[in-house]
Image (spheres, rainbow, N blue to C red):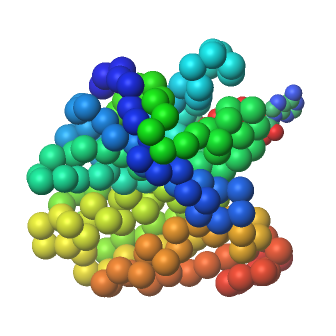
Amino acid sequence: MMIQETTVLWNRMAAKGYYRLGLAISGGFDHAQPGQFVMVRVGSDNQPLLRRPFSLLGLIREEGRVSGIEILFKVVGQGTEKLAGCRKGERLSVIGPLGNAFLVPDTCRQLILVAGGVGVPPIRFLAQSLLEREGGLDRCVVFIGGRTRDDLVCISEFDLPGFLLDISTDDGSQGNPGW
Ligand SMILES: Cc1cc2nc3c(=O)[nH]c(=O)nc-3n(C[C@H](O)[C@H](O)[C@H](O)COP(=O)(O)OP(=O)(O)OC[C@H]3O[C@@H](n4cnc5c(N)ncnc54)[C@H](O)[C@@H]3O)c2cc1C
């Protein structure tokens, strides 16, 4: 775990109210794993004062080393609103990787993953890592939920070999209706 100044590589709207933020890092994430998160200082004027936590959506690799991280966030308040305004080249202080990773034993060949809304980013990271694992997986069923279809983030990224995706929304705007 380390504290470092990162540089914004991109900050793109992924869906209504959701952004994908790519950050160039100087190091420290070579062993980062799905389920871990970072604490981001939003802006340089200490407004808001406290860092905000975001799960790792994935690692950016260049020539065999981890050169960046990606997060996906939903705009809900002061901090994420400010983060949505960040432009390429801006600097953001980040602490991480923090927290525990998901533990999936090597012997586990069939898996069920369940996530919804802003809980999807670490599950997307996990799905990708499991595929890259030696021997891969036999089968994985992924249940993704959201309040409405606008809250279904990253679903196309679960279109992976051996993966079966099952979608639900509270309002029934996509997939199984939640009533
Ligand atoms: C370990 C961890 C990992 C996370 N990973 C992700 C992730 O990958 N992606 C993601 O999008 N989020 C993630 N979150 C959630 C994310 O950290 C929060 O959404 C974020 O910190 C909100 O910051 P903010 O300043 O925008 O909102 P805040 O201003 O802190 O507000 C948060 C919530 O409180 C409400 N609120 C604010 N002020 C008031 C008030 N006065 N009265 C009533 N309600 C109020 C807001 O409407 C909002 O719903 C994660 C959280 C944790 C703990």
Residue pictured at 38% horizontal, 25% vertical? 5
Q: Quarter holding the C terminus?
A: bottom right
Q: Quadrant of residue 175?
A: bottom right
Foreground of the two, 152 or 113: 152
Q: Is residue 104 above or below residue 156?
A: above
Q: Position of residue 150 (x, y in %)?
A: 72, 69
Foreground of the two, 112 or 69: 69
Q: Is residue 86 above or below residue 95?
A: below
Residue pictured at 54% horizontal, 25% vertical? 41
Q: Position of residue 106 (x, y in %)?
A: 18, 61
Foreground of the two, 149 or 14: 14
Query: Viewed as shown, does residue 117 lie left or right of 112?
Result: right
Q: Is residue 141 above or below residue 85?
A: below
Q: Quarter holding the N terminus?
A: top left
Residue pictured at 27% horizontal, 61% vertical? 129
Query: Viewed as shown, does residue 15 lie left or right of 28?
Result: right
Q: Position of residue 65 (x, y in %)?
A: 15, 47
User: Ligand 1 shows up in which quadrant of the image?
Assistant: top right
Q: Is residue 47 visible?
A: yes
The number of numbered badges drawn on the structure is 0
Q: Position of residue 44 (x, y in %)?
A: 57, 20
Q: Quadrant of residue 81?
A: top right
Q: Is residue 35 visible?
A: no
Foreground of the two, 111 or 2: 2
Query: Viewed as shown, does residue 52 lie left or right of 28?
Result: right
Q: Is residue 149 above or below residue 122?
A: below
